[in-house]
Amino acid sequence: MAKATVHPNRQLISSEDVKGTRVFATDGTQVGDIGHLVIDKVSGRVAYVAIRFGGFLGLGHSHYPVPWAALKYDVNLGGYVTGITERQLREAPVFGEEGWGDRSVEAAVHKHYGAPNYWDLAARA
């Protein structure tokens, strides 16, 4: 698990410290960890997190781009919690190199995981 850098207001964390942070299912079972973040260049907001699900629910070790809004930090667990299921991962829209920046592909990914579009959230801020 990554060791978080302590920042004065404790609301901020370095992206370096997010890498390796554990990801848990809603029942508290660890299902993977953070591989890396994908950040919108214009807004500076985290759009996706690549989660490494090593053997999660029978899936091999892979990175899955998941909308950042599909994760919630749990201070008691010291990691992120997600309600993503095996079925959602198996049925996720294909999101290859051509998907980055293609709003229709990105919108399908967000809809699939039931997460708000990051670009809509940026417009509200």
Image (cartoon, helix red, strand yellow):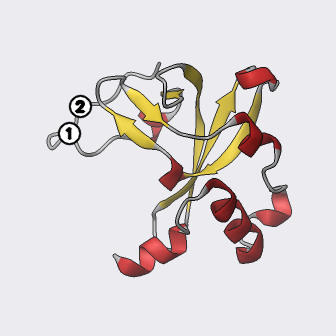
Local crowd size for mark 1, using a 10 Å CA cut-off: few (<14), some (14–19), many (≥20): few
Mark 2 residue element: loop
Q: Is residue 120 above or below residue 59?
A: below
Q: Position of residue 73 (x, y in %)?
A: 37, 38
Give the residue drawn at x 49%, y 76%: 120
Nearer to the camera, 12 or 25: 25
Residue that mark 2 sits on: 6
Nearer to the camera, 52 or 117: 117
Q: Position of residue 96 (x, y in %)?
A: 84, 55
Q: Which residue lies furthest to the bottom in this view?
A: 123
Residue that mark 1 sits on: 10
Image quadrant where one finds the C terminus: bottom left
Q: How many labels does the image show?
A: 2
Contact, mark 2 vs mark 1 (Cβ under 8 Å)? yes
Q: Position of residue 7 (x, y in %)?
A: 21, 38
Disc 2 marks which amino acid?
Val
| 8 with respect to 62 (left or right) | left
Disc 1 marks which amino acid?
Arg
Q: In this view, does 87 lie above or below 110?
A: above
Give the residue drawn at x 74%, y 64%: 100
